[in-house]
Every structure is written in structure tokens, then in C-alpha cells.
Image (cartoon, helix red, strand yellow):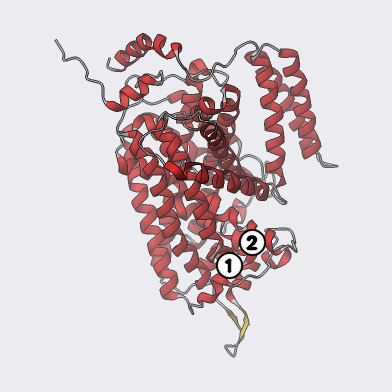
Amino acid sequence: MADKHVLTEDEKVLHQMGYAQELQRRMGAFQNFAISFAIICIVAGGLTAFPVALSAGGGISVGVVWVVGSIFALIVAAAMGQIASAYPTAGGIYHWASLLGGRGYGWAAAWFNLLGLMFVVSSVNMGLFLLTRDLLFAQVFGWDVTPWVSTGEFSSGWWRQSIFIAVATIIQALINQRSLHWTTKLTDWSGYIILATAVVLTLSLLIFADSHDVSRLFTFKNFTGDAGGGVWPLATSGLYVFLLGLLHVVYTITGFDASAHTSEETMNAQREVPKGMLRSVFWSFVFGYVMVAAMVLALPDQKDASGAVTMDGVTAGAAQGWNAFNWLIAQVQMPGILRSVIIIGIVVSNFLCALAGLTSCSRMLYAFARDGGVPGSETLKKVDHHLRTPGPAIWVAGVLAFIATLYGGAFLVLSTGCAVFLYLSYLMPIAAALKSESSGGWTNKGPFNLGGASMLVAGLAVIGCAILIFVGVQPPQEKVGYLIVMMLLALIGFWQSMEGRMIVGLIFAVITGLAVYYFWHVDGDSFGTYAAVIVTAVMAVLVFMLNGKRFHGPPVGEEIRQRQKDIAVAEKAMET
């Protein structure tokens, strides 16, 4: 007769929250850190979003704003870490917001978090395509990449882009579904690959740079408008231009909630998950700062035939607009083989970043479906007994992430939306925890406890998130603001239907469709009309599907006790 399984402390905590140990606990402290470090991936956002900073305030948007934004991210990570220590579940954001702010509040936070995580995969895979096209194909292979440039939906370049992203997403989904071993191994290796690529890139830029004028990092110059290659519309407020640079660092240092989403796969989760988030943010801050600072220092001055400087490097780099990093890596006089190795490292790192992003997104979707929060929950909550992976959640997350890339001008919307939606979802449980703690309602904290600094840290995190959201919806990424409005309208409609008020839900489906038409309609272009009709139709179908399927939120009280028998059955099934 087999020995009776002895519950670990992690399993006991999970059972106390009303959940079975269906996912395999295979991750130690390093693996939990590595998945967030991989999603942050300083050689993804740090490079693709470099023009966002450079074409805002120039060198100071890197030299100073990166530090400011990183400190903000550390504050957010600390506030989230304290909550994760108390509630170490795969649902992360959703679970915390529900328990601390109510089921409706948590349900909304889950959707914003899910959309943000989906945008992580979408934006990184689109960045992967752009880096592969403009660096690997153009600079390493010497190809003419003109046919690979999208000139609009359904153009030849658009098809090449879409097929490339589809293939990359399929490979990432297959790895996630078919092999926990390789998912973990690749995530572990990604940390080393990202770090090695960043170090080699940094040293190469510094060694082969024409000069090292450190004052560049603390010099403000307004490059909005044509001076910055049109990355930002012309702005006159110095403070506003300064704040625009925040989007570079916060787009890069985001997604660290992946450590929380893999709580149920992490050993000693109450302690290691908060540490994983903080370590990933801190080391991304340090190595990322040195790397992006080196990029600014290495921007080559433009000289005439006599050697006289006609344009300083920062001005010349900013004028390249979205092509700033590609121009820089081509201009720096390093050996060709070294440039090729760096570019290959960058491309591989971005692929692994999206792989880790899909892992995090699928775990969030699985956990949300486990409590009946999404259409098709019965399917999406399934875990393969042999592979121990949530296959349906992985593939649905992958498909949705791919669909988001089909819009022609998607990268800026996806990258900014990724940061805005994720930090909005971070804000919600932190704000709920702050309110609950100030009223004496939240007392069952875990071993990671900020003590007397708890409410101060939470307050600073809320203020910082609010500033970021404000900056993130300014032109030219106002479409992110449109998405927030439409998301709120859609969520109200879905919630009303789930509460049994289907007619109200259908009314909001129509209102949401009208909002789509209002925001996206352009004279002479039928895209807004088609989009409005499709959104209204899809919402109407979902409203019918969700009618009366009341969302109860995560289990509490007596429901947890009633679940214990089902938990035992579910865990027994995992052993067969």
C-alpha cells in the first residue's frame, strides 16, 4: 500500500484558499525570479521602445527618467509582493482584488490584467518581427526587407508580418502546452541569455563609441514633433515631455506579476514570490539603466568632411524616430561578427520573452476560469492530467494575442496598452488593500510584510499608477484611452447579463458598438463601421452566453470547507 501523501506547507495554504494543487510545483526561487525577469526582458522593451524616451526629452529621458520609473516599479512590486505573500494563487491580481475589494471589483481587475498580459505577448511578438526584419534580415543577412514592410491591412508586407507572428506564437504555445520541462528550462536560460546579451551590447557600445559625454544623460531637449522623427506630436510643456519618457521604462519593466501567476508552481511561494517580483524589477533596473545609458552615450555625432561636428549624436539619433536603435547599431563601428552575435541574442531574447509572457497569461486565464469568470470557463479551467498544463487556456491566450497584432498600426497601441492595462490592474488590488488596511479590515498578511511602511508604499504606488495611466492615454496613443472606455462599457454589459439583466447587457453592447464607431470612424474608410458591427455582434452573443451565470468570485468561508472533498478528488486524479 502506498504511503499517504503528506501535504506541504504550500499545499496547505492553497487548500485553505479553496483550491486543489493541480499545477506542478517545480519552480524554486531562481525560476520564479527568472520568469518575471524574462517577461521584463530589458533587450525587448529597452530597445524597441528606446525612441519613446529619446524622442521625448532626449538624454535626460534615459539618464534620469529611467531611474524615476524604476523606483516607481519597485514601489509597486513591493506593494504587490505583500499581497501576494498573503494570497499565493495563480489568479494573482484577480484573486487579491476580489478578496480585498469585492467580487465585481476583482472581476474587472482580472479583465484589465488579462488584456495587459495578452498585450505583452502581442507587443513582444510584433517587436520580435520588427527586430528580426530590421536587424537580423537586413543587417546580418543583408536582405532587402522592403517586401516585409506592411503598408496597411492585407498588403504583402502585412501578410508576411502576420504569418511570422502566427508561427512564433504557435511554437510558443506548443512549448508551453507540451513540455513543462522545456518551458522551465527555456525560462531559466532566458535570464542568462538576456543578461549576457545586455552586457555584451553595453560593453560593445561603450568600447566602440566615438566619445563618452556623460552630460548627455542629464541634458533636456524637447524632441517632440518633427525633431524626434514624429514619434510624439509637438508638445510645449517641459514637465509633460519629461513624463512621456516614463513610458519607455514602464513598458520595459512590467509583467513582473508573472511571479504571482506562477505561485501555485513555486515552492515556498509566500516568501519566494514577493522576492521574485522585487529581484526581477531591481536587476532589470540596474542592468537596464547601464544598457540604455550606453546607448545614449554611443549615439555618433554627425561630422562634415573636415571632421567638424554638424549635429550632436542625441539630436541625430532622435531624428531617426522609430528607427533610432537600428540606426545606432548600424552606425557604431564594431566588428561585423560581434554585431551579428548581439543581434541574434536580441532576437532570441525577444522570442523567450514572449514565451514567458504566454505562460503568465495562460495561468491567469486558467485561474480566472477556475472560478467561472470568463465565457467557456468549463473548458478553459481544464488541466491535462499527464502534461500538468492548462492547454485550452494556453491556446486561447495565444490566439487572442495573435489577433491583437492584425491591426496595421498596432505596435505603439500594444506596447503602451500593455503598460497602461497592467499597471491599472496593479493599482486596483493595491488600492483595495490600502483601503482595507486603513479601516482595519486586512490583517491576515503573509510572511512578507512591509509593516509600518505598508500604507505609505501603497499610497505612492497608487499615485504613480494614476500618473502613468494619464500619460499613457495622451496622443498619439489616445487609442489606449479609447480601449479603456470601451472595456468599461463592455464589462458593465457583461456584468449586468451575468446578474440576470440581459436586456441591460444588450443595451450596453449597442453602446459599446457606437463607441467603437465614434472612436475609429474616419471619412472614406469603412474600418470603423465594420469594427462597430463586429464588436456589437460579438458582445451580443457573449451577453446571451453569460445571461444568469452569476460570478461568485473566489471561494470564502463555508464554501472553502465544502470544497475540501472536491480538492482531494482533483488531486487524486492528477496522480493517475
Q: Position of residue 100 (x, y in %)?
A: 52, 28
| Residue at the image point whose x is 78% and y is 33% from the top | 515
From the top left corner, tell me how far across and down residue 422 is, in percent. 56, 40
Q: Which residue shows up at 39% across the image and 40% down it?
A: 274
Q: Mark 1 touching mark 2, by CB under 8 A? A: yes
Name the residue nearer the viewer: 236 or 478.
Answer: 236
Give whichever of 284, 442 is nearer the camera: 442
Residue visible at 75% across and 61% down in the picture:
234
Q: Residue 478: x percent and y percent?
A: 72, 46
Residue behind mark 2:
242
- Vertical relation: 267 (above or below) 1: below
Task: Kindly indicate the quadrant of the structure image that contains residue 56.
Answer: bottom right
Name the residue type under label 1. Answer: Ile
Quarter of the rendering containing residue 308:
bottom right
| Left or right for 320, reference 570 | right
- Say which quarter of the image contains residue 427: top right
Task: Say if residue 458 shows up in the picture.
Answer: yes
The structure residue drawn at horizontal position 52% and vertical position 57%, both measured from the top left corner, is 47
Around disc 2, counting alpha carbons within 10 Å, would you say few (fewer than 14), some (14 to 19), or many (20 or more)?
many
